[in-house]
Amino acid sequence: MKISGFTYVRNGIKLGYPFIPSILSLLPAVDELVVVVGDSDDGTREAIEALKEEKIRIIDSVWDQNMRTGGKVFAQQSNLGLAEISGDWAIHLQVDEVLHESAPARLREYIQQADQREDVDGLLMPFLHFWGDYQHIRNTRRTHRYEIRAFKNVPGVYAYRDSQGFRKYTSHENYLSGEKGVKLDVLKTDITVFHYSYARHPDMLANKMHFFFRFWHNNQWIEKHVPDKPFDFNEVDKLELFTGEHPKYMAEVIARKDWEFNYDPGRSKMKLKDKLLFFVEKRFGYRMFEYRNYTLARPTI
């Protein structure tokens, strides 16, 4: 059985994405890795080439600046990579997501077992969302606990919405026409995805927000809702301390950290409804009214 990986990136250096650690963490789990590199001007492509990894195949792309609704360009870039892979199974990481070095062997075991089940389309992975630095995580109701990051590579599967996850569609034409698609039947795993989207210099994060919101909203909306100042990490509902171990691939990135973040719990703002639901979740381990872009298959492997 062949396992393929795919991802996409544009101006990863300029925008502070840990795309090299992400790629390195995925390589041991796959037999090939397709990297879709958007039109970058900061040496992103050259950095990937410098890895000199035989498994990596770069696909060049140009981002359509007219796709300014719903983050469709991100799904488009994801689908470009998905169309190029040849494996029986696909693993997708976004370039701010990193796997621990212990994950690949276990991930392959999950895939081998799930592949024997016709009622299973993919695998679900838990997320740790880092916020402000590498010591704080935001795992509240405003973040997703799980996402599909591995699935059977069969016709009709495409990126859902802004490449948040994946669904099955009756045809590519219907997908492009706005068909909602069918949720994948997945098995829940214990393979954690380390998500570093909000762990970067506040100036760099502000630049990232300005750039990426262009693919959801027009200029007027951005001027009104995205302030032209460093990102304030204390504008958050709640953070917790992370006491675990980061993937080894992140060691150099973490060592280069050049900003300070002092979490002020007094500034944390959580709506009363969210406070009550958050209490229930922490007390009983169940997130009520959780949005799920997947259907759980029978018990975990």
Image (cartoon, helix red, strand yellow):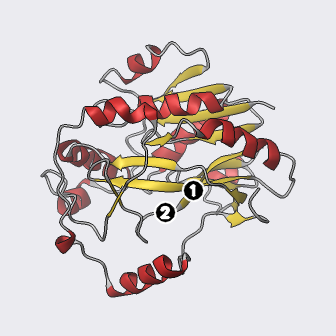
Label disc, if present, on residue 144 of the rendered structure: 2
Label disc, if present, on residue 73 of the rendered structure: none
Q: Residue at x 39, y 35 (%)?
A: 250
- Residue contact at pointers 1 and 2, CB within 8 angstroms: yes
Mark 1, Cα crowd under 10 Å, few <14 / some 14-19 / many 20+, is many
Mark 2, Cα crowd under 10 Å, few <14 / some 14-19 / many 20+, is some
Query: Hey, which residue is sitting farthest left in the picture?
Result: 229
- Give left or right: position of 148 versus 86: left
Q: What amino acid does circle 2 point to?
A: His
Mark 2 lies on a secondary structure that is loop
- Give left or right: position of 155 versus 126: right
Q: Is residue 54 above or below residue 181?
A: above
Q: Residue at x 70, y 48 (%)?
A: 157
Q: For the residues marked 1 and 2, what is the alpha-carbon distance in whole angstroms? A: 7 Å
- Give left or right: position of 43 versus 201: right
Q: What amino acid does circle 1 point to?
A: Glu
Q: Residue at x 21, y 43 (%)?
A: 201
**Residue denoted by label 1:** 147
User: Percent from the top left, x then y, of residue 218?
Assistant: 29, 55
User: Percent from the top left, x then y, of residue 117?
Assistant: 86, 52
User: Percent from the top left, x then y, of residue 275?
Assistant: 36, 83
Q: Residue at x 31, y 37 (%)?
A: 254
Task: In this rendered view, identify the residue nearer to me: 228 or 224.
Answer: 228
Q: Is residue 15 above or below residue 212?
A: above
Task: In this rendered view, identify the residue nearer to me: 11 or 120.
Answer: 120
Q: Is residue 121 above or below residue 20?
A: below
- The quarter of the image holding the C terminus is bottom right
